[in-house]
Image: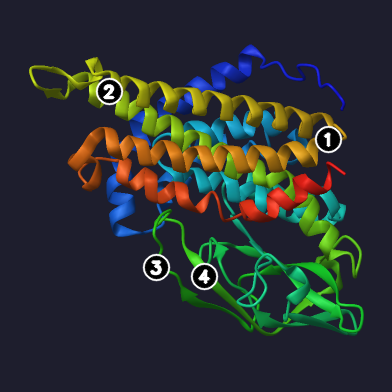
Amino acid sequence: MQILNDVYTIPQEHLDFCATIGEIAREKIAPRSAEIDEKAEYPWDIRKLLGEQDILGLPFPIEYGGTGTGTLMLNMAVEEIAKVDASCALILMIQELGTLPIQLFGSDELKERFLPKCASGECSPAFALSEPEAGSDPAGMQTTAVRDGDEWVINGTKNWITNLGVADFYICFAVTDRESRRITAFVVEADRPGFSVGKLEHKLGIRASPTGQPIFEDVRVPHENVIGEVGRGLKVALSTLERTRLGAAAQAVGIAQGATDYAIGYARERRQFGKAINEFQGIQFKLADMQIKTAAAREILYKACAMADQGHPQRAQYSSMAKVFCSDTAMDVTVEAVQVLGGYGYVKEYPVERMMRDAKITQIYEGTNEIQRLVIARTLK
């Protein structure tokens, strides 16, 4: 077994930027969180704020208007925002997910056309891989793209797509060789004829982020909108998700830390039998375990992010391990936070029930934890 050395350090300027992001989250986002969840409406004002503060530039290199600060700094920011609102953290996460295919495989022309506007927050993308009958199994994809001269004609329906109706363009994966089931990645602008917004889902959590079915009916895109090589779209998708699942892990750590912090503060103030409940050993042990799990999750997340930045040969394994451990931790910790608050934890007046609802999806999207365990197991042979 290979022994890994400590592979990351966090520069002071990253810590300072992270502290600023945390302050913005607490002062500007937290007061809106309950309303954002209740109304289930996309928070355009928060997206504008994140753009103005250069936070949406975190996923991008300097030459395209980004900060050029890498994966670790990006996910530290996701964590800070998710401490107060996981839906708002997803605004930053999707800026990476929906543009990383272009960053990794796109032509210079595609990069120049789309990345600067996303780095500034002017535009927002979406990543359209999953379908009603093809979630964890992209080989079951039914969406097709047929070449017609210098254009491709795309037909199909996607499902579970974040930013539906908000995105300015969609990274759409479609079958381009039916016999070999090879797929290709395309950029599809939202204003192209034939594109429409289908059903929006009513969700348990992450309610302010619109999710649903983009529909492609004879949508024509130029050949220049192909990302990477024709027939190599699966590589585009998997290479993207290898890195962006760290965003889901960071979101999970943020949710867990936010729930832990709230439960600690509540236990300090809540009195029963004549004293604060944090003086009872049963509550003390719960809080201690919540903090232990969250701290451990953060360590594996940060190491995995640093390995992604360095191109470490074990980065895929650690990315999957971080996603599984952090999301499972978020679910465990938020359930315990509700328990610490007792009856108050079960009502919407307090934020931990929202955090528990938000935590669940981190075990599902960006590749279910069951799929991640398969990925990890295959690296152990």
Tell me the residue that label 2 is attached to: 265
Identify the amino acid type marked 2. Gly
Q: Residue furthest toward the top? A: 12
In the rendered image, which quarter contains the C terminus? top right
Q: Which mark is residue 212?
A: 4
Identity of the residue drawn at 40% across and 32% down: 258
Screen quadrant of the N terminus:
top right
Pointer 4: residues within 10 angstroms few (<14), some, or many (20+)? some
Among numbered discs 1 and 4, the one appearing first in the sequence: 4
Give the mark nearest the N terminus, 3 or 1: 3
Sequence order check: which comes first, mark 2 or mark 3? 3
In terms of secondary structure, where does tag 1 sit? loop
Between circles 4 and 2, the one closer to the viewer is 2
For numbered disc 3, what is the local secondary structure? Answer: loop
For the point 83% across and 21% down, the residue is 3
Compared with 150, 189 (above or below) is above
In the picture of the structure, the residue carrying the numbered disc 3 is 202
Q: CA distance from mark 3 to mark 1?
A: 38 Å
Q: Nearer the viewer, residue 67 or 209?
A: 209
State the CA–CA distance, disc 4 to disc 3: 9 Å
Label 1 or label 2, whichever comes before in sequence order: 2
Q: Residue at x 74, y 41 (%)?
A: 64
Instruction: Say whether residue 106 is left or right of residue 164.
Output: right
